Image: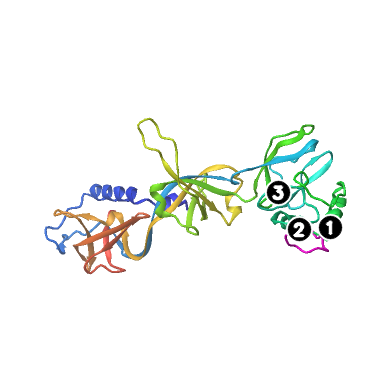
Amino acid sequence: MKLRTALITLGAVAAAGAAGVAAAGFGGADGAGAADAGPDGPPATAEVTTETLTRTEEVTGFLGHGDPLTVQAQNGSGIVTWLPEPGDTVGRGEPLYAVNAVPVPLFHGAAPLHRTLEPGAAGEDVQLVEHNLAKLGYTGFTVDTEYSDATAEAVTRWQRDLGAEETGTVGPADVAVAAGTARVQQLHAAPGAPAGGPVLDVTGTERRIGVDLDAGLEDLVSEGAAAGVELPDGTAVEAVVAEIGAATAEAAEPEGEPAVTIPLVLTVADQEALGTYQAAPVTVLLTAERRADVLAVPVGALVALREGGYGLEVVSGGTSSYVRVTTGLFARGLVEVEGEGIAEGTVVGVPG
């Protein structure tokens, strides 16, 4: 079932409900309580049920792999000799590109190296290198923030395996750094190009959904909240709000006010449910209101009373009478109702 069909916004359903009542041509009771509906009875009936109703807000999102990271070559005088293909995935320790026929492997971390590391160096960048070497199976050193002689020996063994010059030191030109396994999005260089400047763009491998949310809807989202997503072919997918950014104001038109939006990132646990889509606009459904365990009837069961408001034609023992009700949330073609004597299983009239 499509999410857009299953979860309907309040305004649309309320309008449809009012139209349904008018089209049915129902009369109304003169009093505020129950009144005889006449001998004929309704053309059809339905039972009052207990439901959980949800009103949603539809917003536009975009499915993709997240913001790209541009990898910069730091080799200076070298020549790019090999590049992957867009769409390729590159794991820890695997070559992301090659300079002078020497692979530049991918390390996982938060920031690229900014200096050459050698014995005596200390800092988080040292820990990044040691952590990656340990994950790749190199041993004989302690993963900490100190670049020791033992670290240099492990680096030398790693360089030997790569076919690189065995210096025992690691510099910005020797490794590329990304947050995790990378997906190549776009190439900026070609084999034969100087190894300086942008080489390629990478993203994460998991597809996610970005939304620029109108700031007026901020109260509908919180980190960890569930959301529905409808793909271009109508497939319904479950997502979770993973990140909520800071509000930003876009440039306004002349004499207009700037549009304030909040960037959201939604993650999808079931990546297979996204099918073959790699980049596509999607509809995101945010829960605006949820009413659990309420009494509900089909919207068409509402009767417009002459004195105003709505009622239900309650059928019992072969006769029917009108009972005034208070309406609540409209969703999925149903409406929440409360009224004297209205309970689960009560039989009410509906259009035939």
In the rendered structure, the answer to whether residue 243 lies left or right of residue 143 reads left
The amino acid at mark 1 is Ala
In the rendered structure, the answer to whether residue 327 lies left or right of residue 214 reads left
Residue 82: percent from left, percent from top = 79, 38
- Identify residue for label 2: 130
Residue 192: percent from left, percent from top = 79, 32
> What's the mark number on residue 154?
1
Q: CA distance from mark 2 to mark 1?
A: 9 Å
Q: Looking at the rendering, which quadrant does residue 320 occupy?
A: bottom left
Q: In the displayed image of the protein, which residue is found farthest to the left? A: 30
Q: Residues within 10 Å of mark 2 (few under 14, many from 20)?
A: many
Residue sitting nearer the eye, 275 or 342: 275
Q: Is residue 145 magenta?
A: yes
Secondary structure character of the magenta stretch overall: loop
Residue sitting nearer the eye, 164 or 320: 164
Kindly indicate whether the residue at mark 1 contacts the one at mark 2 (C-beta within 8 angstroms).
yes
Q: CA distance from mark 2 to mark 3?
A: 13 Å
Q: CA distance from mark 1 to mark 3?
A: 19 Å
Q: Residue at x 69, y 56 (%)?
A: 124
Q: Residues within 10 Å of mark 3 (few under 14, many from 20)?
A: many
Q: Which residues are magenta?
A: 134-147
Q: Nearer the viewer, mark 2 or mark 3?
A: 2
Q: Residue at x 12, y 60 (%)?
A: 31
Question: Circle 3 sits in a helix, a strand or a loop, which is it?
Answer: strand
Q: In the displayed image of the protein, which residue is found farthest to the front? A: 120
The amino acid at mark 2 is Glu
Kindly indicate whether the residue at mark 3 contacts the one at mark 1 (C-beta within 8 angstroms).
no
- Identify residue for label 3: 177
Figure coloring: rainbow
Q: Nearer the viewer, mark 1 or mark 3?
A: 1
